[in-house]
């Protein structure tokens, strides 16, 4: 085969117009757009199934999402796809709890949910009100983070720095600590405060609206159904269980090397792998340092999302606990035949939460008579090709990484939920970047 330097612009020198590296939601969105524009497209996915950090499965006879889950009509990109493909929604019951329990200094308080929500809302207002306007001047345009530079003054702070700074009670600080722990899916001392301000802007500076938009509604048919629609619509070729080892480019084309030893040639490539695994792919010429440094540093999302069933009906229930308690939050997903299935979120730890015998005493702190019957989950942080959950930035990463991660390098473009302008780390953000990059290639192709 010819080296990349010898490739020219004649169509017979290329296997594809575009090769998409990574078959998550961003990559599949790009492939849909490219295919509909008439470009011959190949999706190369290292894992045995498309979806990236999305995975619809079954647990005790119910459809469950083991990866990315929640969507909302205030997430514009994913809602457009919901409408396009006629997909429906279902609710997570515990997102609107009747009862809440929260831990402060090792003791659990259980009340009607309105008491919890009143305390938590007040705490978040103190936490985010850095400007006397509930943080509204920091990110006045939630989907245009670079509209102002006002956020830069806070990018050297962690969320714990900010919690220590505010005039709040121990109870309010415990609620904030638990909230930050679930949002960053890790030790809250790693969480960049700017990212929390950014999330707050996506909720129109109201934590109730933010919660509703990022934890309430699911795709009725499952996230896998959305992936299937994208692929059926764009009709790209797909190679599964095919890990990319190297991407080489010259002035006229790209050569993608895969683990089997095969090579594929294209005019453009889209790299749609997660931030935490980007540095594991070799690029020639090398990527800009800001990209590889951010990938090696990683975003904070590294915890566990899991489901567990207890032996009683507790209704619509939500619980939270500050770090280092092993579980940051859990809430009711559904009730069936007198049993309650919960979805839980935990920061990284040595506690085996997938063992019912280990999990039961932790849950009893909040529901004293409960016994955990069984559990199910997927450890994304230890998946070779994912190595993390959703993206939440560390302090300084907004400054160092976001703009760099969006930049194309020669004929290689980059699309990931981890570099979105709006709902970064969410399904919506992945669709945003997948659309944006594909359309840039289509426009460039049409002009050539």
Image: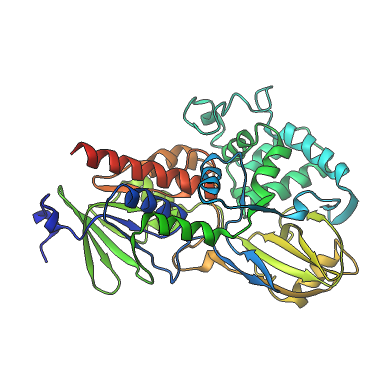
Q: In which quarter of the image is the N terminus?
A: bottom left
Colour scheme in the image? rainbow
Q: Residue at x 63, y 63 (%)?
A: 304
Picture coordinates of residue 257, whole percent (x, y): 25, 65
Q: Which residue is drawn at 33% across and 49% down?
A: 34
Q: Can residue 326 be seen in this view?
A: no
Given residues 148 and 93, the one toward you in this image is 93
Q: In which quarter of the image is the C terminus?
A: top left
Q: In this view, does 363 lie to the left or right of 221?
A: right
Q: In this view, does 82 lie to the left or right of 447?
A: right
Picture coordinates of residue 131, whole percent (x, y): 65, 23
Picture coordinates of residue 258, whole percent (x, y): 28, 68
Residue 119 is drawn in which quadrant?
A: top right
Q: Is residue 342 visible?
A: yes
Q: How many labels does the image show?
A: 0
Given residues 127 and 369, the one toward you in this image is 369
In this picture, is 143 found above or below 408?
Answer: above
Q: In this view, does 139 lie to the left or right of 169?
A: left
Given residues 280 and 6, the one toward you in this image is 6
In this picture, is 383 found above or below 235?
Answer: below
In this picture, is 230 found above or below 350?
Answer: above
Q: Which residue is drawn at 43% across and 44% down?
A: 433
């Amino acid at each position: 085969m010819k080296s990349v330097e010898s490739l020219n612009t004649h169509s017979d020198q290329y296997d594809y117009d575009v090769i998409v590296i990574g078959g998550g939601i961003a990559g599949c969105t790009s492939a849909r757009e490219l295919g509909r524009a008439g470009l011959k497209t190949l999706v190369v996915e290292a894992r045995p199934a498309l979806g990236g950090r999305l995975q619809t499965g079954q647990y005790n006879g119910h459809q469950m999402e083991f990866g990315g889950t929640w969507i909302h009509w205030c997430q514009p990109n994913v809602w457009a796809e919901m409408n396009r493909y006629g997909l429906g929604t279902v609710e997570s019951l515990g997102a609107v709890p009747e009862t809440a329990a929260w831990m402060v200094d090792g003791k659990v308080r259980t009340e009607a949910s309105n008491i919890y929500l009143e305390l938590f809302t007040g705490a978040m207002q103190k936490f985010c009100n850095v400007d006397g306007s509930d943080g509204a001047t920091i990110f006045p345009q939630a989907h245009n983070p670079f509209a102002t530079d006002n956020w830069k003054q806070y990018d050297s702070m962690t969320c714990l720095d900010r919690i220590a700074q505010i005039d709040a009670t121990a109870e309010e600080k415990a609620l904030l600590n638990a909230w930050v722990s679930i949002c960053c899916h890790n030790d809250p001392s790693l969480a960049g405060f700017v990212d929390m301000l950014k999330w707050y802007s996506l909720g129109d500076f109201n934590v109730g609206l933010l919660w509703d938009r990022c934890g309430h509604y699911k795709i009725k048919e499952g996230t896998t159904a959305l992936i299937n629609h994208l692929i059926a619509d764009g009709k790209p070729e797909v190679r599964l269980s095919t890990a990319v080892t190297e991407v080489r480019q010259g002035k006229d084309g790209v050569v993608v090397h895969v683990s089997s030893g095969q090579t594929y040639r294209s005019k453009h490539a889209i790299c749609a792998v997660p931030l935490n695994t980007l540095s594991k792919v070799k690029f020639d010429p090398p990527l800009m340092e800001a990209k590889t440094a951010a990938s090696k540093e990683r975003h904070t999302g590294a915890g566990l999302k899991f489901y567990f069933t207890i032996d009683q009906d507790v209704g619509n229930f939500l619980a939270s606990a500050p770090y280092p308690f092993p579980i940051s939050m859990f809430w009711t997903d559904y009730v069936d035949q007198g049993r309650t299935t919960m979805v839980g979120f935990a920061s990284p730890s040595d506690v085996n939460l997938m063992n019912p015998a280990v999990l039961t005493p932790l849950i009893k702190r909040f529901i004293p008579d409960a016994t955990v019957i069984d559990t199910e989950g997927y450890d994304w942080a230890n998946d070779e090709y994912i190595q993390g959950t959703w993206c939440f930035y560390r302090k300084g990463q907004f400054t160092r990484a976001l703009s760099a991660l969006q930049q194309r390098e020669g004929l290689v473009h980059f699309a990931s939920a981890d570099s979105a302008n709006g709902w970064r780390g969410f399904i919506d953000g992945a669709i945003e970047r997948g659309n944006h990059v594909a359309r840039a290639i289509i426009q460039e192709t049409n002009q050539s």
